[in-house]
Image (cartoon, helix red, strand yellow):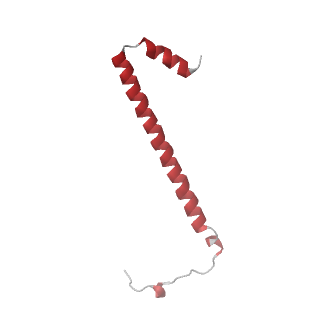
Amino acid sequence: MAIAEKIYKYIEELPEPFQEEVLDFIEYLLMKAKSKSAQQEDESWSSLSLTSAMRGMEDEDTPLYTDADLKVMF
């Protein structure tokens, strides 16, 4: 028997107020899962973006800018 079927079977046995609590908890878990998934996707895009931006820099021998290029020194 699949997990979803077991859950459904147990929920049918509960009084309606408890079924509403189960529904609230399921909605909370779905929201949490979507939030985590969105966060992981954001992290993946950030990593890809940084990797793309840094590509080829390891081959550069001289920096593009030096201290002399600064207008204001801190």
**Drawn side of residue 55 relative to residue 67, left or right:** right
Q: Which residue sits furthest bottom?
A: 68
Viewer-side residue, 3 vs 69: 3
Q: Name the quarter where the C terminus is drawn.
A: bottom left
Above or below residue 12? Residue 56 is below
At a point 53% along the width and 49% down the height, the residue shown is 41
Name the spot of residue 28 as percent of width and height, x first. 40, 33
Task: Give the quarter of the image for residue 47.
Answer: bottom right
Residue 72 placement: quadrant: bottom left
Q: Is residue 39 above or below residue 13?
A: below
- Residue lying at 44% horizontally and 33% vertically, measured from the top left: 29
Image location (x, y in percent) of residue 70 = 44, 85
Q: Nearer the viewer, residue 9 or 69?
A: 9
Q: Residue at x 55, y 21 (%)?
A: 3
Residue 35, x across and y down, in percent: 45, 43
Q: From the viewer's perspective, tell me whether residue 53 is left or right of residue 39.
A: right
Residue 57 relative to residue 43: left or right: right
Q: Which of 65/35 is in front?
A: 35
Quarter of the N terminus within the rendering: top right
Which of 33 and 11 lies nearest the eye of the viewer?
Answer: 11
Q: Position of residue 17 (x, y in %)?
A: 33, 18
